[in-house]
Image (cartoon, rainbow, N blue to C red):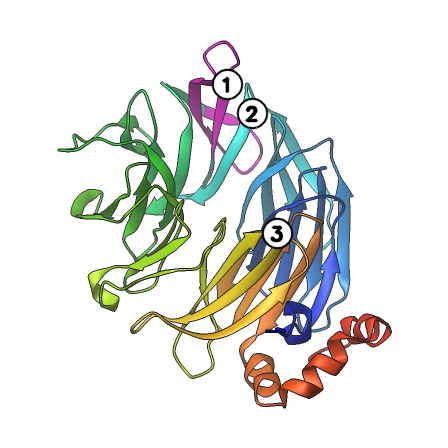
Amino acid sequence: MTLASLESYSSYVREVDGECVFVRIASNLLFSGSRSGEVACWDIPSGMEMWRLSFEGPCSDSDCDDEVFFCTESDNIHAIATGSGDVIWSLKLEGSSDFVRVSNGFVWVTTSVYNFEIQDYSEGAVWQIDFEGGVRNKWENPGRAWSLSDQGGKLVMGLSRPRSGYALVSDSGLDYPELEQPQPVTIGNGGGDEPVVLGHSNGMVTEVVDHRVESVSQVESSVRAIDYFGGWVVGMDSGGVSSSEYFGSWSINLNGVIDVLCFGPSLDSDKGIWVPSSRDGESVISLINPKGGVVEMEISHHSRIVSAFGVEEMICFGDDAGCICIVEGDVLRRRFSRPVEEIAEEDSNSELRRKIRGLRGG
């Protein structure tokens, strides 16, 4: 069956140089960073590029407040003015810079050191940095952090071996709550006013509320992707997707590699789950209704999708070729109502697609 393309449902498509490691939406701005070190920002309503910077690379993660965008890159953390793209400060850290979060008036960054002899991460650290770029504290951790989420004045840091489970990070340092079944964390998400959900290598899913484990669930294989909206949904090594009891504890298999999944706009008024699954360098994106796990729509993409970010009625995707697509709920529903033949005709005309990329809402 021929599927309509992601581009045909996108309000517009933009590019960065190299694999798109992260995408982020904040205050009507779209940010992206690549493995080759390029960081760019676009104004979402107009689609116009605001600024573009080049670092050595690779980029890793990002976060922002109202006026400053923070990104980790190689062994650095950069503070960039969101409006102008001016680099306010850059700070070189020890080891590879991994996750970054803004919380309680500070910037928190995790770093790690990979030991090639043991083929694993041998040490890690958490850095507390003020908004002027000064290091306030550094706490060492045995191994790499695999997630970092802000929750109620502390940060929840997912950990793999040798100290599997999670740590709580605050001004006073690191605290390691005891777990009944400590298992290596592979991915984490959530935070703020919501639970933090951690996926583990054995298929366990841990829900952390008020810094304590509230529930532990089990899915069929190692968790590769996770998101939370009232309940959690995970993508697994097996190509399967499973939900928490909140959504009915359903499971389906998409028969592909799942790198990311994300809640975003749907074909009705509720949230949908967007799950790209990749095979042979291409992707099929399934839009799943969380109530029952029914696939409501499938669209194709010419490259492997490796990053995603959803907020309100908007979702964006980044692929391994540096392509960034942004989908808005009203545009999605309007184009879905059109005849399939009409969309297919647009997809077959590359010249028309390039013109559509420059249009807002099309």
Mark 2 neighbour density, 10 Å: few (under 14) some (14–19) many (20 or more): many
Q: CA distance from mark 2 to mark 3?
A: 25 Å
Left or right? Give the position of 101 relative to 330.
left
Q: Where does the N terminus fall, quadrant-wise? A: bottom right
Whether label 2 touches label 3, CB < 8 Å? no
* Bounds of the magenta segment: 109-136
**Label 2 residue SS:** strand
Cα gap from disc 1 to disc 3, whole angstroms: 28 Å
Q: Nearer the viewer, mark 1 or mark 3?
A: 3
Q: Residue at x 76, y 53 (%)?
A: 51
Residue marked by disc 1: 113
Residue under circle 2?
96
Which dot marks residue 133?
A: none
- Picture layout, residue 5 above or below residue 207: below
- Mark earlier in primary sequence (1, 3): 1
- Which residue is drawn at the image coordinates 50% and 48% (left, top)? 259
**Amino acid type shown at disc 1:** Val
Pointer 3: what residue? 304
Q: Earlier in the sequence, mark 2 or mark 3?
A: 2
Q: Amino acid at mark 2?
A: Ser
Tell me the residue at 55%/18% (across/down): 94
Q: Is label 1 in a helix, a strand or a loop?
A: strand
Residue visible at 74% across and 45% down? Answer: 86
Image position of 285 with respect to 343: above or below: above
